[in-house]
């Protein structure tokens, strides 16, 4: 289950090597699914974008938080129920696909409200939705991402709207996207797989979501997670596997070997003391990251404070 932004592409461009790594994974027998918290674009649009980037994808390979939210709704309400939708076309399409009837926030007969990111959502509709939720209307949110990447920089995400409505109404929504588990459950339901693996670049959504769903996780370092974020990862944000990029899907991952205050892996020796790490030796770059992470997390668990990253220089 591959997250998209920061894993397969960054903005309009594919992550270097990602198309070849995805092809190699498929040739090795892996079933690839592309999953996203973005509820605004339908799967067909996401698949078309991936194909343009050289990453072969069909509509059935893509699962969105909008689809996961629609499944949450239909499991509780049944097909045919009227649902007020506040979002973009991807959310509208998912609700219809699930057999639910799309309506608006003014419909007093609506059985639920579902919200997702939509650049054209009107403030008057947000106000009406907030009042309806305060007065008892069941609310499902596609995700709680506080920011989204845009062509003009990082901008407020759907999580800002969720926070606004929640603070006004005093109600927390049922959430479909990562780190909640419905999106991962919906992916397995739609795509299948005997040993699901979540692959992501964000600790607080991708990795925490995998742990919430009880599946293994591979963290790649092509997105937002760097050394400072990695060494400060809480236990529920720590991946099963770690690699610099999607090439990690095709390579063995040896386990680091703790030895007192040291961790050894593939020629690297990482020693912790006085709140910092000392690295000696040499070897594969991925092994450096794995050994450093293991030593840093041991220090964090013992002291409650992350190690300083001063003087640590990852191998190129």
Image (cartoon, rainbow, N blue to C red):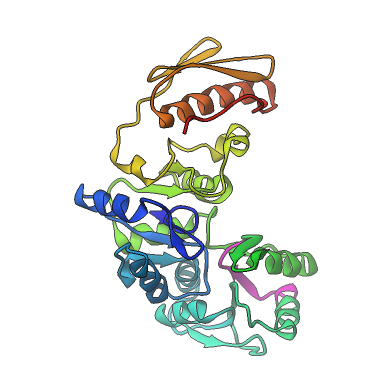
Q: Is 163 positioned to the left or the right of 49 in the image?
A: right
Q: Quadrant of residue 133?
A: bottom right
Residue at 37 percent across and 20 percent down: it is 266
Indicate the position of residue 249 as horizontal and vertical percent values: 32, 43
**Quick one: which residue is furthest to the right in this view?**
168
Indicate the position of residue 3 as horizontal and vertical percent values: 45, 56
**Quick one: which residue is furthest to the top in this view?**
260
Q: Is 248 positioned to the left or the right of 258 in the image?
A: left
Q: Quadrant of residue 255?
A: top left
Is 135 or 48 nearer to us in this picture?
48
Residue 142 among those drawn in magenta: yes
Residue 22 among those drawn in magenta: no
Query: What's drawn in magenta, residue-wise?
Result: 133-144
Work out whether 291 lies above or below 152: above
Residue at 79 percent across and 69 percent down: it is 168
Indicate the position of residue 262 as horizontal and vertical percent values: 52, 13
């Amino acid at each position: 289950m591959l997250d998209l932004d920061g894993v397969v592409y960054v903005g309009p461009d594919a992550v270097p090597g990602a198309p070849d790594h995805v092809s190699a994974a498929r040739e090795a027998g892996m079933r690839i699914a592309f999953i996203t918290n973005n509820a605004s674009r339908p799967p067909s649009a996401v698949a078309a974008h991936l194909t343009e980037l050289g990453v072969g994808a069909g509509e059935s390979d893509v699962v969105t938080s909008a689809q996961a939210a629609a499944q949450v709704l239909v499991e509780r309400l049944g097909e045919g129920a009227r649902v007020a939708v506040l979002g973009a076309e991807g959310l509208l399409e998912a609700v219809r696909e699930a057999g639910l009837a799309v309506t608006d926030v003014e419909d007093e007969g609506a059985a639920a409200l579902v919200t997702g990111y939509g650049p054209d959502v009107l403030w008057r509709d947000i106000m009406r939705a907030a009042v309806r939720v305060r007065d008892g209307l069941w609310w499902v949110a596609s995700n709680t991402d506080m920011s989204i990447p845009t062509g003009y920089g990082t901008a407020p995400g759907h999580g800002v709207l969720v926070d606004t409505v929640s603070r006004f109404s005093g109600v927390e929504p049922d959430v479909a996207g990562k780190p909640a588990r419905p999106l991962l459950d919906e992916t397995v339901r739609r795509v299948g797989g005997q040993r699901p693996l979540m692959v992501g670049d964000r600790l607080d959504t991708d990795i925490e979501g995998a742990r919430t769903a009880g599946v293994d996780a591979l963290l790649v370092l092509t997105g937002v997670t760097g050394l400072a974020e990695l060494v400060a990862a809480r236990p529920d944000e720590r991946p099963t596997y770690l690699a610099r990029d999607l090439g990690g899907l095709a390579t063995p991952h040896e386990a680091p070997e703790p030895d007192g205050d040291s961790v050894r892996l593939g020629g690297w020796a990482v020693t912790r003391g006085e709140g910092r790490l000392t690295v000696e030796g040499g070897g594969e770059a991925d092994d450096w990251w794995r050994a450093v992470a293991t030593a840093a997390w041991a220090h964090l668990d013992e002291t409650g404070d992350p190690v300083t990253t001063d003087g640590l220089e990852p191998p190129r």
